[in-house]
Image (spheres, rainbow, N blue to C red):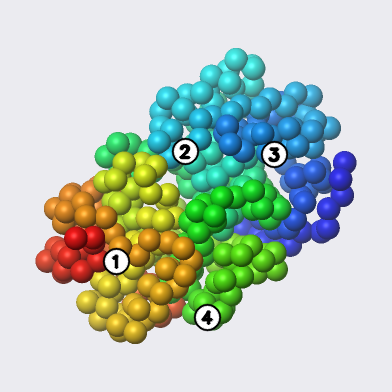
Amino acid sequence: MRVSASPECVEIQLGERSYPILIGSDLLGDSTHFDAVPAAATALIVTNTTVAPLYGEALRRTLAGRFRAVHLLELPDGETHKDWPTLNLIFDALLSHGCDRKTVLFALGGGVVGDMTGFAAASYMRGVPFVQVPTTLLAQVDSSVGGKTAINHPLGKNMIGAFYQPRLVLCDLSTLATLPPRELSAGLAEIIKYGPIYDMAFFDWIEANIEALVGRDPAALAHAVRRSCEIKAAVVGQDERETGLRAILNFGHTFGHAIEAGMGYGRWLHGEAVGCGMILAAHLSQRLGGVDAAFVQRLSALVERAGLPVTAPALGAERYLELMRIDKKSEAGEIRFVVIDKPGSAVMRSAPDAVVREVLAQCCAD
């Protein structure tokens, strides 16, 4: 067993469903970091064909002393596989190994693996424990935290799922060393979003350190992951099931999900679509009187410096509107957007279709 330095800990406060987020380097090899995991005879590590060769066996070795049997399942990689057939592969593995309701699932990978493993855990025998071990920046700062689990439908992203909290989130920053540059930039989008909606001092810090983040400076990444998790923990602790405040975490996502669905899942990474979606949402916020043009330009410049696309694809205004009406935040066919009412504060608002069309006309490719 390799002993790592003590990780930092951020707590998600949800009463009896509370759990820790551990953040540090070289954590996967130390079994003591999994002390919060309930005892069981069997564990199933769910990963994908990209992550498994890098970290699958390392995690299995670490868990071998805690479980009699540790099984490893490799799923196909990519957003295009976040669907029913791939989800069923997890159920197939659980049933073929005779897993019971105490079996612990470990989600080792990015947001797709985490979402599907969590949904499988919520569903198998009506609920078994699971642990998030995110290996992408996006998953470490967003999707692994808060208990949202889902699969996609051809008509909409994350439309089929459940709220189901993990027992532990283990963010090993060392895994970011193997992350492709495009995936790193995608994660930066979810970090950037926390500034406009919640903490402009953090936004200032991101602006000053964006090159360090792109360059994978360990100290910069550690601070960004920790602060992002602190903000998400604070929001989720107040609104676990997204009945109010938690919706602000979807800043840029209404436009972003439309981009992903309209382009075909996998063409744009989720973080790329969210980064561009934030620019569209900022322009909408300006038209609704929440921010000025200088703020929109400031956000756009930061998104571009993060290596993310700043021009939305030309799907056509009517196609955008059609896709956004399927968004989970829509009510009675009325699209509701997360907009900035002032820098550092966000609200949910509807907007006239004519205004949304103006934003699309300004921000989409010719």
Number of labelled discs?
4
- Cα separation between marks 3 and 2: 17 Å
Q: Which residue is mark 2?
A: 78
- Cα separation between marks 3 and 1: 37 Å
Marks 4 & 2, CB-CB < 8 Å contact: no
Q: Which residue is mark 3?
A: 55
- Cα separation between marks 3 and 4: 34 Å
**Of pointers 3 and 1, the one earlier in the residue sequence:** 3
Q: Secondary structure at mark 2?
A: loop
- Cα separation between marks 2 and 1: 25 Å
Above or below for 328 versus 283:
above
**Of pointers 1 and 4, the one earlier in the residue sequence:** 4
Name the quarter where the N terminus is drawn. Answer: top right
Q: Secondary structure at mark 3?
A: helix
- Residue in the picture at 34% in, 77% down: 296
- Kind of residue at badge 1: Leu
**Of pointers 4 and 2, the one earlier in the residue sequence:** 2
- Kind of residue at badge 3: Tyr
**Of pointers 3 and 2, the one earlier in the residue sequence:** 3
Q: Which mark is residue 204?
A: 4
Give the crowd class for mark 3: few <14, some 14-19, many >=20 residues within 10 Å: some
Give the crowd class for mark 4: few <14, some 14-19, many >=20 residues within 10 Å: few
Task: Examine the image and state in which quarter residue 100 appears.
Answer: top right
Q: Secondary structure at mark 4?
A: helix
Marks 1 & 4, CB-CB < 8 Å contact: no
**Residue 14, percent from left and from top:** 58, 56
Q: Which residue is mark 1?
A: 280
- Kind of residue at badge 4: Asp
**Residue 229, percent from left and from top:** 59, 62
State the residue in front, 48 or 238.
48
